[in-house]
Image (cartoon, rainbow, N blue to C red):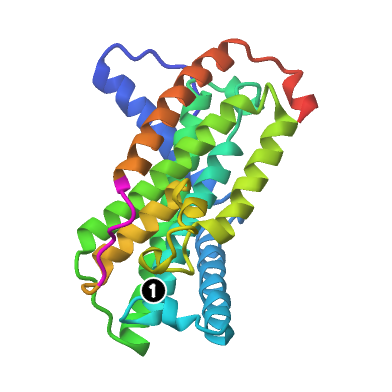
Amino acid sequence: MFQYRTDKSTFSRFTTISEVVFHSVVRSVRSTHNNAVIAILQNLVQSVMFVAIFYFMMTILPGGRSNAVRGDFLLFMMTGVFMFMMHTKTMGAVLGADGPASPMMQHAPMNSTIAIISAALGELYLQVISMLVILFIYHTAFKPITIEEPVQAFGMFLLAWASGGAIGLLLYVIKPWMPGAVKIISMVYMRSNMIFSGKMVLAGTLPGYVLPFFTWNPLFHTIDQARGHVFINYNASVTNWHYTAWLAIIFFVLGLMGEFYTRRMASLSWDARR
């Protein structure tokens, strides 16, 4: 995997980088357990537990079900939970990727960019597999489900992944300079997503004076837009996926610029400050 080689052609360099990315993705997936299957099962169980907890909360709370879209209530909950898990876990994975001063960077052609890409792709793999398995089991064993626009809905799922990765990338490049502040910011953002991501509420039913507390959140827009594609009788009119897309692009560009600068200023003493 990590060995010196001379790549004379563009295709050869692409093949080399792809091979390193593949092995890094495998390493990222196995970061929670040496067995990749068990790592997937752990993530699957976590997703099921989130769905069950929020389903229970929405059932016992007064007016909980009335705030949901007309249709399959459990599917309504799963759309929010799956995208919440994808967004926050991708942000955490990218934020926790190996930095430029990591011992892994001593092995050419490994670099911090590959570590970031691998962390994001590894989380995408875990979340997509978990989502498909849960939906398949629910569809076959409990109740048939219908997704009106599956391609567009999956596009919103990918947008939640991209925006989470972009936010994680921006925090990743700031972390070596302000590790304490980044830890607080990431924790506050993840905790606020528990409430202001809109996974337990329907954006179209929120009063106008409450919406500003949610509309700043890019995940809120992607969850609501996904529900507009999943359910035929819901029109996501108060949110806009362009907001999330532009925010992800801006954060991604700033993150790449910062990563390039931070990599040049890398120091082994950074690890001692974390």
- From what the image shows, is residue 76 above or below residue 16? below
Tell me residue 170's x, y (percent).
Answer: 53, 30
As shown in the figure, which amino acid type bears the numbered disc 1? Answer: Phe
Residue nearer the viewer, 91 or 206? 206
- From what the image shows, is residue 120 above or below residue 33? above
Asked which secondary structure carries label 1, the reply is: helix
From the viewer's perspective, tell me whether residue 237 is left or right of residue 194: left
Q: Residue at x 39, y 69 (%)?
A: 205
Tell me residue 181's x, y (percent).
Answer: 71, 32
- From what the image shows, is residue 191 above or below residue 73? above
Decide if residue 7 is in sight here: yes
Q: Residue at x 22, y 63 (%)?
A: 150
From the viewer's perspective, tell me whether residue 194 is left or right of residue 228: right
Most extreme residue toward the right is 272
Q: Which residues are magenta?
A: 234-241
From the viewer's perspective, tell me whether residue 257 is left or right of residue 18: right
Is 20 magenta? The answer is no
Residue count near mark 1 (Cα–Cα under 10 Å), binned few <14, some 14–19, many ≥20: many
Most extreme residue toward the bottom is 142
Residue nearer the viewer, 243 or 36? 243
Q: Which residue is mark 1?
A: 76
Q: Residue at x 36, y 88 (%)?
A: 141
Residue nearer the viewer, 246 or 92? 246
Tell me residue 113's x, y (percent).
Answer: 47, 26
From the viewer's perspective, tell me whether residue 84 is left or right of residue 268: left
Q: Residue at x 55, y 70 (%)?
A: 50
Q: Magenta region's main secondary structure?
A: loop
Tell me residue 119's x, y (percent).
Answer: 50, 41
Residue nearer the viewer, 235 or 20? 235
Is 236 magenta? The answer is yes
Decide if residue 24 is in sight here: no
